[in-house]
Image (cartoon, rainbow, N blue to C red):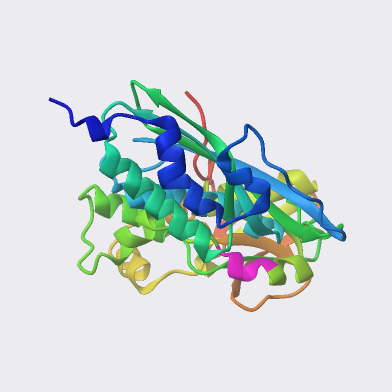
Amino acid sequence: MSDPADRLDEFGDIARLFRPLTRGAPGALGLLDDAALIPEAPGFDLVITKDAIVAGVHFLADEAWDLIGARLADVNASDLAAKGAEPFAALLAVAWPHGAGRADREGFARGLGAALARTGVALIGGDTVATPGPFVASLTLLGRVPTGRMVQRAGARPGDRLMVSGVIGEAGLGLRAARGLIDDPTGALEARYRRPRARLDLCGLIRDHASAAADVSDGLIADAGHIARASGVGLRLDLAAAPLSPAARRWLAAQPDRAAALLDLASAGDDYEIVATAASALPGFTVIGEVVTGEGLHVTCDGREVEAGPGGWRHGG
């Protein structure tokens, strides 16, 4: 027999779980209205992004609810980080499967709230519904950038350096570790997959120096390719220059084909680092190639051309 407390109570859940996440923002109107009010900020442009996550597609079907909530916030914030925009408000839509009890909903709200609070984001509205399944949630995230300063995928110029922040490939290895396919003695790889963090610390650097940028969500190669297409330029990317963590280097050393393994790491999604182009190298970034005249992405490894294929995740049926 189901616990009455587990039944979905839309307005009760909004008041109990999500109203505290507004952080008192006046524009949220206490989540009592069907819309939010966002006063314009003189001297700033509004930048808006929206991502959805689906159970068993964008995270493991048995993932902890607090980590699901945190993931939803961070994958959206990653898009704004690549634009050089500072997030400040969010709208949430959640489709709860019938099996999602009160403790599950509380866990999701707790994880979402903690991730939003890290960056000072207020929840200002949204909607919740019930569904036979699976769980689906979508966040619309609003950010500000000084007028005319948003960094687009378009903007890369021949002669620019191609670079990426942090390390790449860890999240892909972490997914394999979570599925029991590779060893992960310390749990560091799995944690990188389960707990992504948007590189909002790089917003100012991107805004001030990058000619083009994208977040590494689909895979380094795929997202660098997005920049090449949007900018109408060619990119040369050297897999051997890709920054790797010690754990990824240990995995690489055990693989029989170095080029294929590096291609694997550079095609894995969910790293949520920033791939960018700029006139010169930026602190916290590793130069992995260059922008050239022409078009398309040309991938090499140890001086040899590599056929990259799609180079990452593609959405489709």
Residue 161 appears in which quarter of the rendering? bottom right
Which residue is rendered at x = 46% and y = 55% of the image? Answer: 113
Query: Which residue is painted at 49% across and 55% down in the image?
Result: 266
| Front-lying residue, 211 or 237 | 211
Residue furthest out toward the left:
1
Reply yes or no: does residue 200 show up in magenta.
yes
Quarter of image, res 132: top left
Q: Position of residue 53 (x, y in %)?
A: 46, 38
- Please state if 60 lies on the left or on the right of 198 as rendered: left
| Above or below, 278 relative to 12 | below
Answer with left or right where residue 9 lies relative to residue 294.
left
Tell me residue 165's x, y (percent).
57, 68
User: As displayed, is residue 209 above or below residue 21?
Assistant: below
Say if 220 sits above or below 5 in the image: below
Which stretch appears magenta?
A: 199-203
On the image, the x and y values in percent for residue 23 come to 55, 57
Residue 150 locus on image (x, y percent):
78, 56
User: Which secondary structure type mostly characterizes the magenta part of the structure?
Assistant: helix
Determine whether, in the image, residue 77 is placed left or right of residue 261.
right
Q: Give the quadrant of the N terminus.
A: top left
Reply yes or no: does residue 225 show up in magenta: no
User: Can residue 91 be seen here?
Assistant: no
Q: Residue at x 44, y 52 (%)?
A: 112
* Residue drawn at x 39%, y 54% as measured from the top left: 111
Residue 29 shows up from this direction: yes
Which of the pair 229/202 is nearer the observer? 202
